[in-house]
Amino acid sequence: MFRIFSIDVAMALIFGIGYAGIIFEESFAFNKSGVGLLMAVSLWAVRSIGAPSTDIAVSELTNASAEVGEIVFFLLGAMTIVEIIDAHQGFNLVTDNITTRKPRTLLWAIGLVTFFLSSVLDNMTCTIAMVSLLRKLLPPSEFRKLLGAVVVIAANAGGAWTPIGDVTTTMLWIHGQISTLQTMKDLFVPSAVSLAVPLALMSLTSEVNGYGQDSSNVMASEQMAPQGLLVFFVGIGALIFVPVFKALTGLPPFMGILLGLGVLWILTDAIHYGESEKQKLKVPQALSRIDTQGVLFFLGILLSVSSLEAAGILRELANFLDAHIPSSEVIACVIGVVSAIIDNVPLVAATMGMYDLTSFPQDSQFWQLISYCAGTGGSMLVIGSAAGVAFMGMEKVDFFWYLRKVSGFAFAGYVAGIAAYLAIHNLPISLSTTVAQVPFLSGS
């Protein structure tokens, strides 16, 4: 018994130290991907020592690697497709059609376009595309920074209501905690509310109402590459087709994304055949530009969490939370708030290890709230999401500016979205019942 306890303590310490290294990456000057991989291998080594036998540990690792591999392959495929579209300036089709310069109209236009664009793109790519658009529309100003913050909130909100819009929703979808249509149906309104509330509040601020238009220091728009329109539609179509492919064949989502990548690979090879100067528009060059270290970070984190799950530590943590926080909704909301400080990928991965589908079945309120809260909670701090970090680097926004100017609006949207979800799912009178009671609609 003491040996098992000491093994569990050792694994918890390794995870805690590794997690601290990831959180304080900038202070320690250690890349979080390297820390994550080192942590993963160390945890599985300790698990191998503490397991009843090495064969059991190897079997657990094999099963964990298969599950993690599905997510990693999916991310690699999706990121490559988005990179190919971006290389062809395909997103100009969306961004170049935003021509208004009226502050309040622009605020809502940027928010809504980002919201829907991020439902099929990863949040970081969507943020980079939209902030680049802002540079073409507006000179450096307080208003432009505020619009950049809107992009962050909208990107995180848009990614929460589709299974391919965010890494965490993709993880939940691949492992069966949420399904495609039910998630989109149940989370669209809360996600939209989490954006609409900050937009409405920001519309009242002096930064928006007092902004004077100025066309100086505005970047020129880059021209779309040859066949960029075709690549855009094929690439976006490939992303949207993934849930359809899964429904039709029953195969895991990464197979659908690899199908899309294969089609796009052949297409770009064909349309740029013999054009040596267009190598950057082909898949091999795109593969060299994707965020490989980010993928390795996900790999390290997911393998680390799977070791804690195999050792039973996450189950013990779940039992502790259930004993002290009886409401699953509160647990989900707290996870969302914590995700503003700590990366949401390990948080969601740990939650998936703590609670299985027997505790909460597919599409239960708990899993849907986890999807919403982990996705939108990161907007409350600029460091709370990949979108925020990308915006921070591109516009040179500091942590305390975002905290003063934006965090309150983002928190209001987060709470309003949760309230909207709970109201929709817990109202005692359903819509169909209400309609049936209206005489001229019920046919009586």
Image: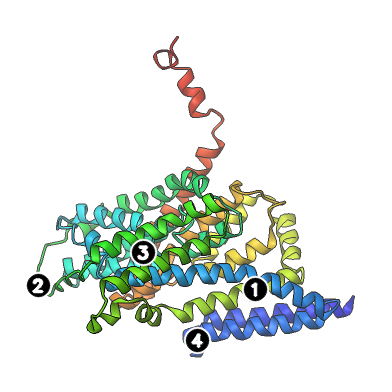
Q: Amino acid at mark 2?
A: Ser
User: Is residue 15 shown left or right of residue 415?
Assistant: right
Distance from Cα at disc 2 to Cα at disc 1: 53 Å
Q: Quadrant of residue 4?
A: bottom right
Mark 2 vs mark 1: in front: 1
Distance from Cα at disc 4 to Cα at disc 2: 38 Å
Mark 3 vs mark 1: in front: 1
Residue 340 in sight in this render: yes
Mark 3 and mark 1 residues within 8 Å of each other at the beta carbon: no
Residue 152: assigned label:
3
Mark 4 vs mark 1: in front: 1
Q: Secondary structure at mark 2?
A: loop
Mark 2 and mark 1 residues within 8 Å of each other at the beta carbon: no
Q: Secondary structure at mark 3?
A: helix
Which residue is drawn at the image coordinates 66% and 79% (left, top)? 15
Q: Which residue is mark 4?
A: 31
Q: Position of residue 122 (x, y in %)?
A: 41, 65
Residue 216: assigned label:
2
Q: Position of residue 299 (x, y in %)?
A: 57, 76
Which residue is drawn at the image coordinates 64% and 75% (left, top)? 303
Q: Which residue is mark 1?
A: 65
Disc nearer the start of the sequence (2/1): 1
Which residue is drawn at the image coordinates 42% and 68% (left, top)? 262
User: Is residue 120 shown left or right of residue 66?
Assistant: left
Q: Position of residue 152 (x, y in %)?
A: 36, 64
